[in-house]
Amino acid sequence: ESADVLHERHGAVVLLTLNRPQRLNAWTYELGDLYFDLLDQADADPSVRAIVVTGTGRGFCSGMDGEALSKSAGGTKTMPAKGRRMTHALSVHKPLIGAINGACAGFGLIQALHFDVRFAAESAVFTTAFVKRGLNAEYGSSWLLPRIVGQGRAMDMLLSARRVGAEEAE
């Protein structure tokens, strides 16, 4: 098992922890492949009743890793090795519960939108970040976010990329 995603079993609950604290758990394709593998394993196990996802250290997931974004911009983009879509977590049948600590930005926010339930620590900060990079709201975020927070709040977040703290998010 790679250190990029930690896997623990607590009775009928699987805990997955994104584990790149030096990069605020920024997403890489390698991390994604392992995360999706572990989601699939938990989903296929009849003794697992729920999956909890969190991050190590000060952040949940700060978005796509800068090096991965640079490769994409340079035309050397790699994709997840197993050919799964970046929205793969939406295909999981077990309840997905997010325990969101610290930064939850960009692609990290997209992953949080895939959870059935989200719990945020007081340190949690949510931002779309796309507009600041000249990117569109990808991977279904422009469809999911309004269904979770309402159209007006979603448009505010998507168009401004402002930071929303845990108290406001609640």
Image: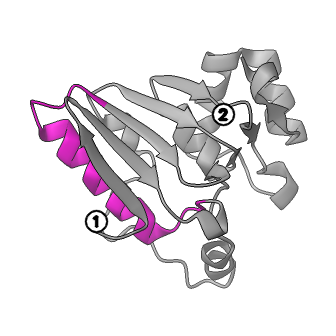
Residue designated by label 2:
142
Residue 155's place in the image compared with 29, above or below, is: above
Query: Is 163 covered by the magenta stretch?
Result: no
Q: At x 37% / y 57%, what residue is drawn?
A: 6
Q: Nearer the viewer, residue 100 or 40?
A: 100
Q: Earlier in the sequence, mark 2 or mark 1?
A: 1
Residue designated by label 1:
82
> In this picture, which residue range is highlighted in magenta?
25-50
Q: CA distance from mark 2 to mark 1?
A: 25 Å
Which marked residue is nearer to the observer: mark 2 or mark 1?
1
Q: Quadrant of the N terminus?
A: bottom left
How crowded pointer 1 is (Cα within 10 Å; few <14, some 14-19, many 20+) is rated as: few
Q: Which amino acid lies under the numbered mark 1 shown in the image of this protein?
A: Lys
Q: Quadrant of residue 154?
A: top right
Q: How far from the left and from the top, in percent, is residue 26?
A: 60, 62
Q: Quadrant of the C terminus?
A: top right
Q: How far from the left and from the top, in percent, is residue 33?
A: 35, 63
Q: How far from the left and from the top, in percent, is residue 93?
A: 26, 28
Is disc 2 placed on a helix, strand or loop?
helix
